[in-house]
Image (cartoon, rainbow, N blue to C red):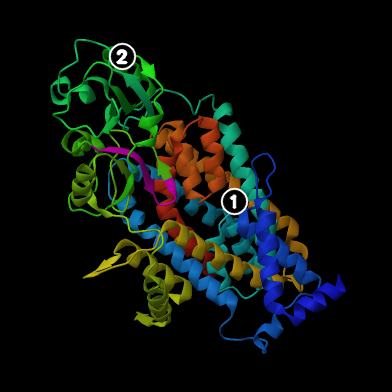
C-alpha cells in the first residue's frame, strides 16, 4: 500500500482521478435500496486514502494554492445548483397548490437548522462539526460544500459529514417506509383531496385496432370526435400499403388499422367503438418521432393541458413532461411551468404550431453553450467579493452566495436579448457531478491526514445530533403537511423528500406508492430546498 501511495503522490492528478473513480463506484453500491451516492462514496474513499498518506501537494507545488481543482469543482457545483433551481425556484413561489408542497419542504430545512444549532450548543459541538452534522442529516452535498468555504476546521467538517450522512440517508428512507404504516395511511390510496388537482389513473399506452364497426365507417374523425368520446388520440392509420398521418377530415374505412394512444380504461372504450385490438408491425415502425418543446411562451405558465387543447387544435399529444430532474406523467389538469420540457408527438405541422405557441423546440443535445457557465461563474465570483455596508455591518455574499445567486438568476433568464443559452440536461448533470466529486475528493483527502483531530470526543454527540436532525424535521414537516395543510399522504411525503433534496427518498416513495405520483410534490419542494440547503451551510457556521 505504501508503494502505491508513493506512486500516486508522485502523480497526484492520477491519485485525484483514482479517488473520484473509486468513490463514484463505491457510492453506486446499494443495499436494500440504500446507497451513499457519488458524493458520499467519494468522501469516504478520500478520507480513507488521506489517512494512508495520499496527498495532492505536488499537484500545485505550494501548500495553499489560491486556485485548485477542488475550488474549480466547488464553483462548478454551487453554480450548477443555482442554475438547475432557477426556472423552478420562482415558479414554486408563485401561489397555486404548489405553495403547500414548498412550505413543507421549508419546514424540513428550518427545523433541521434549529435542531443542530440548539443541540450542538447544548452538547458543546463546534461550528465545523455542527455544519457537517447538518449536511449529513439532510444528505446534502450543497450544504457541505457551502459550509466548507467559511468553516475553520475542514477536517472536522468532512468527518462529521461522512459520519452522519449514512444516518440521514437510512433515516429518511426508513421513515418513508414505516411512518405511513404507523399512521395507518396508504400512499396508494385513491382518496383525493377535492382541493388538489386530479392525478393520472394509469400511464399512457399505444395500441393498434382494426376498424370493424359499420357505424363509424365512412365518417371523418372530426364527425366521430373519438378524442372527446373515448379520451384516446389516433396517431397513425394503416390502410392497404400506406401508413397515413390522420387529420380532422380523414375518414375511417373497414379494415383500417389505427394506432391509438390513451390510458387502459380509455382504450377499452375505444375498442368497443372502433373494433378489436390487433398487432401491426408497420404501424409501430411508422410512429412519428416525438419532439421536445420547452415552455417559454407568454401566458402558458400556469395553464393546464386541458386549457391548451393541443389534441383538438393541433392533433398533438403530450407523452411526458420533464420538470428539472423529475419526469412527470401528463394529465389534463396538470399546470405547466416555465422551462418544463414537453415530449410531443403528432403531425409535423401540428407539432410545429404547438411549439410556436408553447415556446420553442429544445435544441440538439449535442450543443452546449459554455459561455453561460464560464461567464456566470466569473460573474458569481466577482459578485461574492462585493462588500455592501448595511448599517454597522459589512455584508458580503461570499463565494457560495455569489455563485448561487448568479446561477438562480441566469438559470431563470436564459435568454438575453438575441442570445439564448442552451445546456442539455445531460451536460448540466455531468458538470454538477464532476464539480462536487472534485471538491469532495480534494477536501476529503486533506481531512484524512488527521481524520479525528477536530472531533476528539465529539463522535457520539455528533451522531446523536445527526439522528435528531433527521427525525425531528421529518416528523414536524409530516405534522404540518397532514394536519395544517391537509395534504394527501403521498404529497406530504413527496414534499418531505424534496425538502431533504434526497433522491433516495423519491425512489423509496415511488416504490411505496407504486406510482410516480410523489414526483410532483417532490419537484416543487426540491426547487426551493436546493437553494435553502446551500444557504444553510454558511448560516449554521455563523449561528454557532
**Magenta residue check for 320:** yes
Tell which circle, 2 or 1, labels the residue nearer the N-terminal end.
Answer: 2
Q: Residues within 10 Å of mark 1 (few under 14, many from 20)?
A: many
Q: Which residue lies most toward the top here?
A: 214
Q: Mark 2 to mark 1: distance in Å?
A: 59 Å
Q: In the displayed structure, does residue 444 sit left or right of residue 237?
A: right
Residue 38 percent across, percent down from the top left:
62, 57
Identified at 58% across, 58% down, the residue is 134
What secondary structure is found at the residue carrying circle 1?
Answer: helix
Q: Nearer the viewer, residue 309 or 349?
A: 349
Q: In the displayed structure, does residue 458 sit left or right of residue 180?
A: right
Q: Nearer the viewer, residue 63 or 153?
A: 63
The relative height of residue 47 versus residue 257 in the rendered view (above or below) is: below
Q: Which residue lies most toward the front here?
A: 241
Rendering quarter of residue 507 = top right
Residue 265 percent across, percent down from the top left:
36, 19
Q: What residue sits right under mark 2 in the picture?
A: 275
- The magenta stretch spans which residues? 316-326
Q: In the displayed structure, does residue 216 sit left or right of residue 172?
A: left
**Magenta residue check for 127:** no
Identified at 76% across, 68% down, the residue is 49
Identified at 86% across, 75% down, the residue is 3
Q: Can residue 538 be seen at all in this image of the molecule?
A: yes
Rendering quarter of residue 62 = bottom right
On the rendered image, what quadrant is the C terminus found in?
Answer: bottom right
Q: What residue sits right under mark 1 in the picture?
A: 469
Amino acid at each position: 500500500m505504501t508503494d502505491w501511495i508513493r506512486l500516486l503522490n508522485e502523480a497526484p492528478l492520477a491519485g485525484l482521478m483514482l479517488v473520484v473513480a473509486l468513490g463514484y463506484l463505491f457510492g453506486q453500491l446499494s443495499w436494500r435500496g440504500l446507497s451513499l451516492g457519488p458524493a458520499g462514496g467519494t468522501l469516504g474513499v478520500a478520507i480513507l486514502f488521506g489517512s494512508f498518506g495520499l496527498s495532492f501537494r505536488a499537484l500545485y507545488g505550494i501548500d495553499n494554492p489560491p486556485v485548485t481543482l477542488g475550488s474549480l469543482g466547488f464553483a462548478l457545483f454551487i453554480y450548477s445548483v443555482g442554475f438547475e433551481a432557477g426556472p423552478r425556484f420562482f415558479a414554486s413561489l408563485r401561489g397555486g397548490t404548489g405553495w403547500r408542497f414548498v412550505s413543507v419542504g421549508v419546514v424540513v430545512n428550518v427545523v433541521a437548522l434549529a435542531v443542530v444549532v440548539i443541540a450542538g450548543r447544548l452538547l458543546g459541538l463546534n461550528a465545523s462539526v455542527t455544519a457537517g452534522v447538518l449536511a449529513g442529516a439532510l444528505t446534502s452535498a450543497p450544504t457541505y460544500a457551502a459550509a466548507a468555504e467559511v468553516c475553520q476546521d475542514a477536517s472536522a467538517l468532512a468527518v462529521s459529514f461522512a459520519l452522519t450522512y449514512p444516518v440521514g440517508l437510512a433515516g429518511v428512507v426508513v421513515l418513508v417506509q414505516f411512518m405511513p404504516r404507523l399512521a395507518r395511511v396508504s400512499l396508494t390510496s385513491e382518496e383525493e383531496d377535492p382541493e388538489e388537482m386530479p392525478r393520472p389513473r394509469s400511464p399512457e399506452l399505444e395500441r393498434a385496432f382494426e376498424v370493424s364497426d359499420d357505424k363509424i365507417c365512412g365518417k371523418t374523425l372530426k364527425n366521430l370526435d373519438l378524442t372527446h368520446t373515448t379520451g384516446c388520440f389516433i396517431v397513425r392509420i394503416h390502410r392497404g400499403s400506406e401508413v397515413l398521418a390522420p387529420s380532422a377530415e380523414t375518414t375511417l374505412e373497414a379494415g383500417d388499422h389505427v394506432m391509438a394512444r390513451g390510458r387502459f380504461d380509455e382504450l377499452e372504450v375505444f375498442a368497443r367503438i372502433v373494433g378489436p385490438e390487433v398487432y401491426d408491425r408497420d404501424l409501430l415502425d411508422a410512429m412519428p418521432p416525438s419532439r421536445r418543446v420547452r415552455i417559454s411562451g407568454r401566458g402558458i405558465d400556469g395553464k393546464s393541458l386541458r386549457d391548451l387543447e393541443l389534441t383538438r387544435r393541433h392533433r398533438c399529444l403530450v407523452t411526458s413532461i420533464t420538470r428539472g430532474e423529475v419526469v412527470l406523467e401528463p394529465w389534463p389538469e396538470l399546470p405547466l411551468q416555465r422551462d418544463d420540457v414537453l415530449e410531443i408527438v403528432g403531425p409535423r405541422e401540428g407539432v410545429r404550431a404547438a411549439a410556436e405557441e408553447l415556446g420553442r423546440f429544445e435544441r440538439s443535445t449535442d450543443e452546449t453553450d459554455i459561455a453561460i457557465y464560464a461567464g456566470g461563474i466569473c460573474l458569481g465570483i466577482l459578485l461574492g467579493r462585493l462588500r455592501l455596508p448595511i448599517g454597522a455591518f459589512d455584508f458580503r455574499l461570499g463565494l457560495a452566495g455569489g455563485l448561487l445567486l448568479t446561477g438562480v438568476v441566469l438559470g431563470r433568464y436564459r435568454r438575453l436579448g438575441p442570445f439564448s443559452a442552451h445546456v442539455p440536461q445531460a451536460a448540466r448533470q455531468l458538470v454538477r457531478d464532476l464539480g462536487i466529486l472534485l471538491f469532495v475528493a480534494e477536501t476529503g483527502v486533506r481531512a484524512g491526514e488527521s481524520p479525528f483531530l477536530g472531533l476528539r470526543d465529539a463522535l457520539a454527540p455528533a451522531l446523536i445530533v445527526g439522528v435528531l436532525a433527521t427525525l425531528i424535521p421529518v416528523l414536524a414537516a409530516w405534522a404540518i403537511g397532514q394536519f395544517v395543510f391537509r395534504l394527501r399522504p403521498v404529497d406530504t411525503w413527496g414534499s418531505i423528500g424534496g425538502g431533504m433534496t434526497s433522491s433516495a427518498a423519491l425512489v423509496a416513495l415511488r416504490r411505496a406508492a407504486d406510482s410516480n405520483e410523489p414526483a410532483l410534490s417532490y419537484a416543487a419542494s426540491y426547487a426551493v430546498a436546493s437553494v435553502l440547503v446551500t444557504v444553510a451551510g454558511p448560516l449554521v457556521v455563523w449561528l454557532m
